[in-house]
Image (cartoon, grey):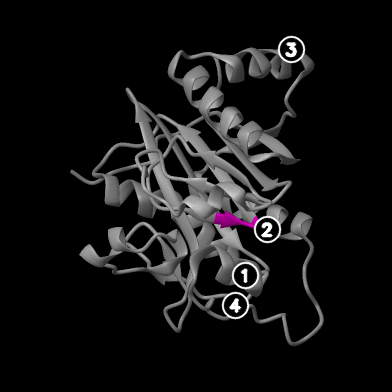
Amino acid sequence: MKSEVSATPFWRFIPLINAPGKVQMAIDSWLLEQHRLGKQPPTLRFYTWSPAAISLGYHQRRYPTFWNSLPLDLVRRPTGGRAVLHQGDLTYMIVTNSISGKRQEVYRLLCEFLIQGWRSLGIQLHYGTAGRTYMKNPSCFGTATVADLVSSSGNKFIGSAQLYKGQALLQHGSMILARDRELFEQVFGSPVLPLELPWSQEGGVPGVETIVETLTEAARGCFGVELVNQPLSDWEWQELSAFQLN
């Protein structure tokens, strides 16, 4: 059965939030649970991590012990996958229940707006093909699976992961915009692959706001929805504070 994106009157769009990793993961988890309960519409948001952090996949129990002593936040994602160093990246998040199909098909449907958006910014992306060696690499960006988007030369550019709760789905992923090479090598013990951003040599680096605007417009077209700008309210922040304590 071919998977489809159902017609949806509107999705909520939450403006860019810059916050610690534990807060960001709490927001994602809370939005998923609220959507599962029918209290929130499908939602798209983008965010950045401050301070820099390492996020662990939900089932990732083994990692280098020295990570605990690094001047970085160490947080756990609600989704699976391997560790991600969040420094100089932009993260997207989608919560929806309007998509059916096999997991790989759902990834491709939800990632289409990323492909189209980044194409308009000058980057051609396609899906990765990593096999069983994926689980042997501690770094999520050390290899690319069919859920990830890579550049024309094969370097991973966007890594994504999913979590289902009933029919509700959370998908989020990290887009690498800049890298601290020394920090990456300190964390993962291996050289970092070069970024392939077409504007890096031209001096015309688009701001995060421009990137978010471009990807948001791509999402609107890909999913055929109206995106309603609605920041988190004061009472929602209060709900989130209680949610983090549970």
Residue at screen point 52% across, 43% down: 224
Q: Main secondary structure of the magenta part?
A: strand
In this rendered view, identify the residue nearer to me: 15 or 225: 15
Q: Sequence order check: which comes first, mark 2 or mark 1?
A: 1
Query: Where in the figure is residue 42, as x and y percent of width and height?
Result: 52, 30
Amino acid on which the number 1 mark rests in the picture:
Ser
Q: Is residue 234 left or right of residue 93?
A: right
How far apart marks 2 and 1 lie (CA) works out to: 8 Å
Q: Sequence order check: which comes first, mark 2 or mark 4?
A: 4
Q: Sequence order check: which comes first, mark 2 or mark 3?
A: 2
For the residues labelled 3 and 4, say whether their Cβ atoms are less than 8 Å apart: no
Q: Where are the magenta residues, as a range? A: 85-89
Front position among marks 2 and 3: 3
Judging by the rendered image, the residue that carries numbered circle 1 is: 120
Query: Where in the figure is residue 142, as x and y percent of width and height?
Result: 42, 68
User: Tag 2's secondary structure?
Assistant: helix
Residue furthest to the bottom: 201
Front position among marks 3 and 4: 4
- Quadrant location of residue 44? top right
Judging by the rendered image, the residue that carries numbered circle 3 is: 235
How far apart marks 1 and 3 lie (CA) works out to: 37 Å
Residue at screen point 60% across, 20% down: 244
Q: Is residue 121 in view? A: no
Q: Sequence order check: which comes first, mark 1 or mark 3?
A: 1
Q: Residue 195: which numbered mark, if any?
A: 4
